[in-house]
Amino acid sequence: MLSDRAALVAAVCANPAEDTPRLVFADWLQESGEPERAEFVRAQCALARAEDEYDGSYAMYEFLRRVYPTGLAATKWQRIDPGVKRLVDLHARCDKLLRKHGARWRPQGPGRRAKWGTFRRGFPYRVELRSARGLGALAAGLRGTVPPVELAARDALPRVLDLFDEPGSLDWLSAVDTTGAGLRDLGHRSEARNVSDLRVRGPGDGEPSIPTALGAPNWTGLRTLHLSDGLISRATAEALLRLPNLRTLRHLRLRAHDAWVADPVRTLAVDGFTELRTLGIEACGLGDEAAEVLASCADLKNLRHLELRDNSITGRGVTALLTSPHLANLVYLGLERNPCAGVDTNGLAGAAPGGLRLFH
């Protein structure tokens, strides 16, 4: 029995992007007297597939889970959107199972030096590093027991790179949450090709610029990129959005606290970000011209979620976004804390219906 479990988990670890080994493991768990763990793996795989597809139901669910979880849980979704109801039910069941069994399902150790966080697709996914001491033992324990994880290292990433300086020794990474420190060095290592999600919260003193760091040759597998909190000037944004290795992004969020005007948005609009499902450009001083550039971008036809909070868009820009034929598949439009007065009601009345379900 133990050898069967080890072999099935090893298959999951060897094929981390595929659901089939996880579902085979769930079947084995069901047959081996662990039905709740089997249910958890299946439910989380279903949630991950929904996130990857990012249809209208998932866009509604994600927004409401973030800003109004009480209302999301209390609403009778079967009368409004059965897809949202299914997601709510799956998430609630996963939470209940995790509260009951999470301590047993997480790997043991390394105590106070790291903290296990969320699960993804049935396995522990996020580990928050509190001290680089003991990281070697942690990584050794990860291999073969859980698929590649997200490491929240903040400013300790350079220390991690020093500890794991052998080629391939960071093969247990699939996502990174950090400051800008160490990103360029990681991008020159082959393991960076396996990093799909990257969250950057601010560069360290003396570190290379973010475009320089993300221009390193091995950042080729990124699907999610979040840059936040004063990190991105107008010039930085333009340089960043010209990087060819970012064309595979499905989720992009930029929060700058700087006045960009329309130029970085124009760069984004002409450089072929055809895979984007979610786009957030927040606190960047965007006005109506920038909104009109987004509205005229044919490459954004797959966009489902557009967050433009804390900008300077008035009714003119709002009208352009709401009537754009290129944004017909948009499900959620967020314009919180914009001066939206002056919408052209005649323009709205003459526009073709689109897919919008949430206007915040």
Image: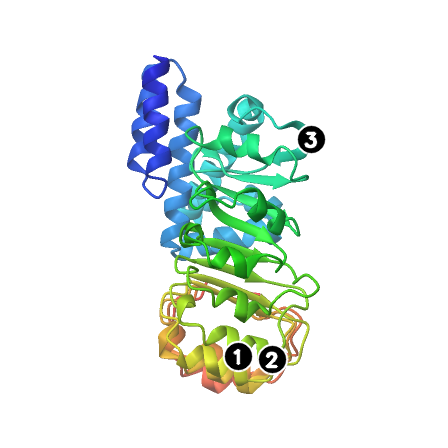
Q: Position of residue 308 (x, y in %)?
A: 57, 71
Give the crowd class for mark 2: few <14, some 14-19, many >=20 residues within 10 Å: some
Q: Position of residue 54 (x, y in %)?
A: 40, 55
> What residue lies at 41% left-to-right and 29% top-to-bottom?
144
Please say if the residues under marks 1 and 2 sit with CB atoms less than 8 Å apart. yes
Secondary structure state at the residue bearing disc 2: helix
Q: Position of residue 120 (x, y in %)?
A: 46, 39
Give the Cα separation between the discs numbered 3 and 2: 40 Å
Q: Amino acid at mark 1?
A: Glu
Give the Cα separation between the discs numbered 3 and 1: 41 Å
Rendered view: 44 above or below 50:
above
Q: Amino acid at mark 2?
A: Arg
Labels 3 and 2: the sequence-earlier one: 3
Q: Position of residue 270 (x, y in %)?
A: 40, 81
What residue is pinned by disc 2? 234
Q: Is residue 353 visible to us here?
A: no
Labels 3 and 1: the sequence-earlier one: 3
What residue is pinned by disc 3? 112
Q: Nearer the viewer, residue 124 or 359?
A: 124
Q: Residue furthest front?
A: 166
Q: Quadrant of residue 143?
A: top left
Q: Nearer the viewer, residue 151 or 349?
A: 151
Rendered view: 160 above or below 313:
above
> What residue lies at 57% left-to-right and 39% top-to-bottom?
127
What residue is pinned by disc 1? 238
- In the figure, is residue 359 to the left or right of 47? right
> What residue lies at 60% left-to-right and 70% top-to-bottom?
209
Q: Quadrant of the N terminus?
A: top left
Q: Amino acid at mark 3?
A: Arg
Circle 3 or circle 2, nearest the eye: 3
Give the crowd class for mark 1: few <14, some 14-19, many >=20 residues within 10 Å: some
